[in-house]
Image (spheres, rainbow, N blue to C red):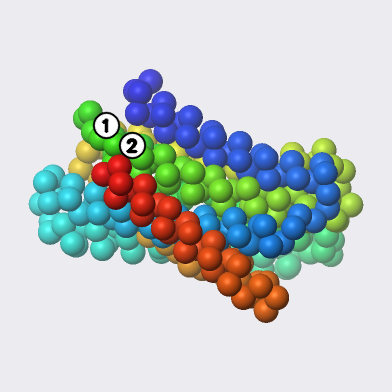
Amino acid sequence: MDAIVLMALIATICTWLVTTLGAATVIFFKSPNPKILNLMLGFASGVMIAASFWSLLQPAIERAALVCRQPAYLVATSGFLAGAIFMWASDKIVTFAHKRVNNTQISSDSRLHRIIMLILSITLHNIPEGLAVGVAFGALKNGNYSNESIMGAVTIAIGIGLQNFPEGAAVSLPLRREGFSRKKSFFFGQASGMVEPIAGLLGALLVVYVESILPFALSFAAGAMILVAVHELIPECQKQQKTSPYFATMGIVLGFATMMLLDVMLG
C-alpha cells in the first residue's frame, strides 16, 4: 500500500478512535458537562473553518493553476460548492428516510425510530469528514512533504477528531437514556464513526492515482467541512448561549487562531 494512503488510513482510524472515546463516556455517566462539550464543538468548528482555507482551498487554487486546463478559481469554486451540496444532500437523505420510517409499521415504535435516525444522521456526516482527511493526506503525493502540507493534513485530522468526541457521545448517551445497556450504547456510538476510515481511504486513493482530481477534491473537502461547521457545529455549541454567552464563541476563536498559527508558523 502506498505510504500516503497508509497515512490517510491511520489518520482516519485515529479519528474513529476519538469517536470511540466519546462513546465511552456512557460507561461513566448518562450526561456529560454541556459546557465542556460546547467548548470542544466550538474549538473544532474554528479549526475546521481555518483548515478549509489554509489547508484545503489555498493549496487547491495553487495546484489547479499548475495542472488544470480550467481557470483555478473555477475549479476551486465548483469543488467547494459540490462539497457543500454533498453535505446538503446527505441531510436530505436523512429527512427522506425519516419520512419513510414514519409511513411504515416501524414508526409505531417511536423509540426504535429515534435510534435509527440518530445513528444514520451521525454516520452520514462522518463520510465527508473522512473524505476530507483522506484528501488532505493524498495531497502529500509526489514528495510534497513540506511542514505546511504535513501539518495541514494533521491539523485537519485533529480538528475532525475533536468534533468526533461529542458526536460519539451524542449517539451513545441518548441510547443509554432510552434504556439500552452501556455495552450496546457504546457499540452503536463507536460504530457511527466506522465509515471514516473507509471514506478516508477512498479519498486518498482518488487523489493519489488521479492527479488531476486533486484541486477539485481539496475544494470539495473544504465545502463539506464549512457546511458541517456552520450548519451543525456552531449552532450546536451555542445552545447554552444564555447562561454562557461567550464560552463556546471563544472556543471557535481559539480553534481558528490555533489552526492559523500552526499553518502560518510552520508554512
Give the structural element (helix, strand or loop) at label 1: loop
Q: Is residue 88 visible?
A: no
Given residues 157 and 97, the one toward you in this image is 157
Left or right: 259 in relation to 44: left
Q: Earlier in the sequence, mark 1 or mark 2?
A: 1
Residue type beneath disc 1: Tyr
Q: Position of residue 213 (x, y in %)?
A: 25, 45
| Residue with the most extreme bottom position | 242
Please state, as top left, top right, bottom left or bottom right, where the N terminus lies in the image. Answer: top left
Which of the 4 quarters of the picture holds residue 210?
A: top left
Give the structural element (helix, strand or loop) at label 2: helix
Mark 2 — residue?
150
Kindly indicate whether the residue at mark 2 contacts the one at mark 1 (C-beta within 8 angstroms): yes
Given residues 133 and 101, the one toward you in this image is 133
Given residues 103 and 191, the one toward you in this image is 191
Left or right: 203 in relation to 142: right
Question: Which of the numbered marks, if any, corresponds to residue 118?
Answer: none
Q: Is residue 208 visible?
A: yes
x 83%, y 49%: residue: 29
Q: Residues within 10 Å of mark 1 (few under 14, many from 20)?
A: few
Residue type beneath disc 2: Ile
Question: Which of the numbered marks, if any, corresponds to residue 145?
Answer: 1
Q: Residues within 10 Å of mark 2 (few under 14, many from 20)?
A: some
Q: Position of residue 266 (x, y in %)?
A: 30, 42
| Distance CA(mark 1)–CA(mark 2) | 6 Å
x 43%, y 59%: residue: 256
